[in-house]
């Protein structure tokens, strides 16, 4: 097998020209996959727009959302303090109270405990209203009556440009459509080529009158829901006492329906314009326009309408049934349409250019949209396509670092389709968001609903992104740095206002794209998942630790990590056993607040992430020469937190979320189990841990079979020849195509440095002949290596910091030869045999080292 750097395969940008993604255009559902699905193959995306292509042949429709188009209205409840939470938990009115079922889902109970007895949620507005919420842009419809009744078409997406093509009809009557979501501008281009038409082709822009208000009002927007149908604010302990329901009337001044969309036309331009309500971020209201321009032979007449059934009506497909109520409201609603119809011609071609411009982009959105459209028309479809090819080519060139090489071509499709969507992360919702620019989205935000799941906002309690950084894809994670930078002042206010403590606290929740003048609260119980801030900062830590982003470290990571450590140190309490306890602490999306905090003490997730925070803050304080007065306290706290809670099973001990409760998992429970965090987040139980600790973690991952437990088996090197499984049904890895899928899912199969020691090919089949180029390891090392059936070949390590390098001997039992590439000098090293054979040498920033097995 050829060594790293040899021309073993074609460049990725060339490989991409061979790969296409094919999928069927659903006739009636704009969101045909399961609602929770995070598979991006179902969506068309650009940096700010996520779209879906759907509809019958005679009315192919593109629906979309844009990352800054939000109804930003919010209620402003008085924050619930930790003192009030404690009063409710220790109230005699709640003694003996339990609303946890002995079996069934572990999802948390509503709200926190009220001193009167029962539960109260001061942040009920988050459930009571459908806002703040991401909103649909509207529909772009290509209408061709001659195609009615033809078979449903497929679409083909080209991975070198992102262009989507679909051909409908046959020799007599046909229409070819090419869609392009531009990656460098907010332009959608639709190129058509048609023949044999008896009815002129037309292009329609459409937006229904928003129906979000129907969550809490009647269709006309004149009355609020009957009281018993409203969101509960207070649920008494005793069922014979009256519940309290949300008081919409008190907020009637600002909580009404959204104004209907407007249509318009001027010369060749035609548009739909929507104004969203005024609020603190955009006190004059937030506007956007979807404006079209038709270019091609002949002219287009423009017609404006407002009424029913002017757009493509959505119906839920199997797996997306939870959206049917929203779709029903949309089908019943009126809407605004504007249609450009080509002059009568049976054959020809035309291109529609559409710009989506918001108040975020320009003060005069109509003028800006016209400017963008004229520029796009002047450049033309082919130039826009070339622009996209350049954008994707740059992405593929960047991904040459972090590339895995396999024999043959069987893996090309799996590799390129993975890379095609590698420029964003799942929490950003298929786009690139920047909270500083009032942008947000989520994987579950859909293109054609007015009341989004979880408001179309990302949740921050499961950011597991180390493997992306290992593969050098931290450019897709920049939303996390923006989030911390933007919300840090408000998080400091949150620590003081809610807890009366110094530092900062970024908690579980859904921070909307609004002016961050104060923290936004959405769930009083889940905000006690105190490890959430550390989980978010772990993303930034990995970008620093693996990727050596010094600017991020100084600008954002350390100021936030320092303040989080300050808060954690003030929050913990030393008790009679000499240990620092964390009370209250809620297990993520399980159990909720209970009387006397019975299930809310020393969760495993809080313990491991508090300790991670203390140690990483101390490490960075040393690196930066700062806060030496705080460091001893952080290290003392890290060394004196409680042991991890465990429970005994028939097979041996497993990690529990909280002490005394045997964890369980079933359909409907939260799919991320906190008992595995010491491996997947805190990097405490790893390949170099004791056999006992690894066995406990592996047993935990298997006996509490949440689907997100799978990486544990890879990180502990237990599934070299199989895909990881939590249900006992393992699937073997028997081909390079399968191996490519497995490594795309878990890049740390080929390099795992969670312990600080570099392990090569720890979860790769012995038969595999593969190599990888410039994966990132802890300490900022870039590592390249190859292997075949006989073992590891050449290893190259590039240092970007000056510090010792620890790498497990790729040739156990054999001496190692280390050469500095530029000088050719032999480098001294030692062998640490305390835990197998670890090669240790002093690496110098800017130098590369070649490791090989020395001849005896």
Image (spheres, helix red, strand yellow):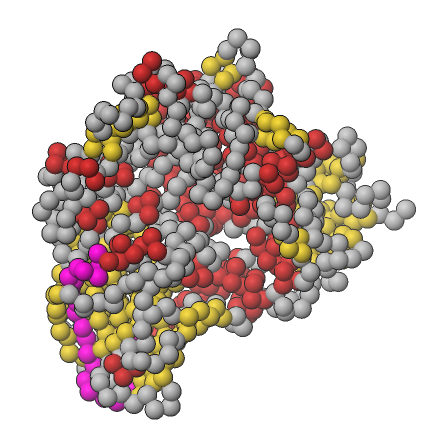
Q: Is residue 699 left or right of residue 215?
A: right
Residue visible at 57% across and 33% down in the picture: 678
**Quadrant showing the N terminus:** bottom right
Residue 666, position in %: x, y?
49, 42
**Residue 755 among those drawn in magenta:** no
Query: Which sits in the foreground, 80 or 440?
Result: 80
Residue 832, position in %: x, y?
77, 33
Q: Residue furthest right?
A: 856
Query: Which sits in the foreground, 250 or 556?
Result: 250
Residue visible at 53% across and 23% down in the picture: 660
Residue visible at 31% across and 80% down in the picture: 149
Q: Is residue 126 visible?
A: yes
Q: Is residue 609 left or right of residue 274?
A: right
Instruction: Say if 299 sits above or below 763 in the image.
Output: below
Residue 27, position in %: x, y?
34, 70
Q: Residue furthest front?
A: 240
Instruction: Say if 784 sits above or below 119 in the image.
Output: below
Q: Is residue 331 left or right of residue 762?
A: left
**Residue 330 among those drawn in magenta:** yes
Q: Is residue 40 left or right of residue 55?
A: right
Residue visible at 20% across and 87% down in the picture: 344
Residue 283 figure quarter? top left
* Bounds of the magenta segment: 329-352
Instruction: Say if 453 sits above or below 347 in the image.
Output: above
Q: Is residue 568 visible?
A: no
Residue 319, position in %: x, y?
40, 57
């Amino acid at each position: 097998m050829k060594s790293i750097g040899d021309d073993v395969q074609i460049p990725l940008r060339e490989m991409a020209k061979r790969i296409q993604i094919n999928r069927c255009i659903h006739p009636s559902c704009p969101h045909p996959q399961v609602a929770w699905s995070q598979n991006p193959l179902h969506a068309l995306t650009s940096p700010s727009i996520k779209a879906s292509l759907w509809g019958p042949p005679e009315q192919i429709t593109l629906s979309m959302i844009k990352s800054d188009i939000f109804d930003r209205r919010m209620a402003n409840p008085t924050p619930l303090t930790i003192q009030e939470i404690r009063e409710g938990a220790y109230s005699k009115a709640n003694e003996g109270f339990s609303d946890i079922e002995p079996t069934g889902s572990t999802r948390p109970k509503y709200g926190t405990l009220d001193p009167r007895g029962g539960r109260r949620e001061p942040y009920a507005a988050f459930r009571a209203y459908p806002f703040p919420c991401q909103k649909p842009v509207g529909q772009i419809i290509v209408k061709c009556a001659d195609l009615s009744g033809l078979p449903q078409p497929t679409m083909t997406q080209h991975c070198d440009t992102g262009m989507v093509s679909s051909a409908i009809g046959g020799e007599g009557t046909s229409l070819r459509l090419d869609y392009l979501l531009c990656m460098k501008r907010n332009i959608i281009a639709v190129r058509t080529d048609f023949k044999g038409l008896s009815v002129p082709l037309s292009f329609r822009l459409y937006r229904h009158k928003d129906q979000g208000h129907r969550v809490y009002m009647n269709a006309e927007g004149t009355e609020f829901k009957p009281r018993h149908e409203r969101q509960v604010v207070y649920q008494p302990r005793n069922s014979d006492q009256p519940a309290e329901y949300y008081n919409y009337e008190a907020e009637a001044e600002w909580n009404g329906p959204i104004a209907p969309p407007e249509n318009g036309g001027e010369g060749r331009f035609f548009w739909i314009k929507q104004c969203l309500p005024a609020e603190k971020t955009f006190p004059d209201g937030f506007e956007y326009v979807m404006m079209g321009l038709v270019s091609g032979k002949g002219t287009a007449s423009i017609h404006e309408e407002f009424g029913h059934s002017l757009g493509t009506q959505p119906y839920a497909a199997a797996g997306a049934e939870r959206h049917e109520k929203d779709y029903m409201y949309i089908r019943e609603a009126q809407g605004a349409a504007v249609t450009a119809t080509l002059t009568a011609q049976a054959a020809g071609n035309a291109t529609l250019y559409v710009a989506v411009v918001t108040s975020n982009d320009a003060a005069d959105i109509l003028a800006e949209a016209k400017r963008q459209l004229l520029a796009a028309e002047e450049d033309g479809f082919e130039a826009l396509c070339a622009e996209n090819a350049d954008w994707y080519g740059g992405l593929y060139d960047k991904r040459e670092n972090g590339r895995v090489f396999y024999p043959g071509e069987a893996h090309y499709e799996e590799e390129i389709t993975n890379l095609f969507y590698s420029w964003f992360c799942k929490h950003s919702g298929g786009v690139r968001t920047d909270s500083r620019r009032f942008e947000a989205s989520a994987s579950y935000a859909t293109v054609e609903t007015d009341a989004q799941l979880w408001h179309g906002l990302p949740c921050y309690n499961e950011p597991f992104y180390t493997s992306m950084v290992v593969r050098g894809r931290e450019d897709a994670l920049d939303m996390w740095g923006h989030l911390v930078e933007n919300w840090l002042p408000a998080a400091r206010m949150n620590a003081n206002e809610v807890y009366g403590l110094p530092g900062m606290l970024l908690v579980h929740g859904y921070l909307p794209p609004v002016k961050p003048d104060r923290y936004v609260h959405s769930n009083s119980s889940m905000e006690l998942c105190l490890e959430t801030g550390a989980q978010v900062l772990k993303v930034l830590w990995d970008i620093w630790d693996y990727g050596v982003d010094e600017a991020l470290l100084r600008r954002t990571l350390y100021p936030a990590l320092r303040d989080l450590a300050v808060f954690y140190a003030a929050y913990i309490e030393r008790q009679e056993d000499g240990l620092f306890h964390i009370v209250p602490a809620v297990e993520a999306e399980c159990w909720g607040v209970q009387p006397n905090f019975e299930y809310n003490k020393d969760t495993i997730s809080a313990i491991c992430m508090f300790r991670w925070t203390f140690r990483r803050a101390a490490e960075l304080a040393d690196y930066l020469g700062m806060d030496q007065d705080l460091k001893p306290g952080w290290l003392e706290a890290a060394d004196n937190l409680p042991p991890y809670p465990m429970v005994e099973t028939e097979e041996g001990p497993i990690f529990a979320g909280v002490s005394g409760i045997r964890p369980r998992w079933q359909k409907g429970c939260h799919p991320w189990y906190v008992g595995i965090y010491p491996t997947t987040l805190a990097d405490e139980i790893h390949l170099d841990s004791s056999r006992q600790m690894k066995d406990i973690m592996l047993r935990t991952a298997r006996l509490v079979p949440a689907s997100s437990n799978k990486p544990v088996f890879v990180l502990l090197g237990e599934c070299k020849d199989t895909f990881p499984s939590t249900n006992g049904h393992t699937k073997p890895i028997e081909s390079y195509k399968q191996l490519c899928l497995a490594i795309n899912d878990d890049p740390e199969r080929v390099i795992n440095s969670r312990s600080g020691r570099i392990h090569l090919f720890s979860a790769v089949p012995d038969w595999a002949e593969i190599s990888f180029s410039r994966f990132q390891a802890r300490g900022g090392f870039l590592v390249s290596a190859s292997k075949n059936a006989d073992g590891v070949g050449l290893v190259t390590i590039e240092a970007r910091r000056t510090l010792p390098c620890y790498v497990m001997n790729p040739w156990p039992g054999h001496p190692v030869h280390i050469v500095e590439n530029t000088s050719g000098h032999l480098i001294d090293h030692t062998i640490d045999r305390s835990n197998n054979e670890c090669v240790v040498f002093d690496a110098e920033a800017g130098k590369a080292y070649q490791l090989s097995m020395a001849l005896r």
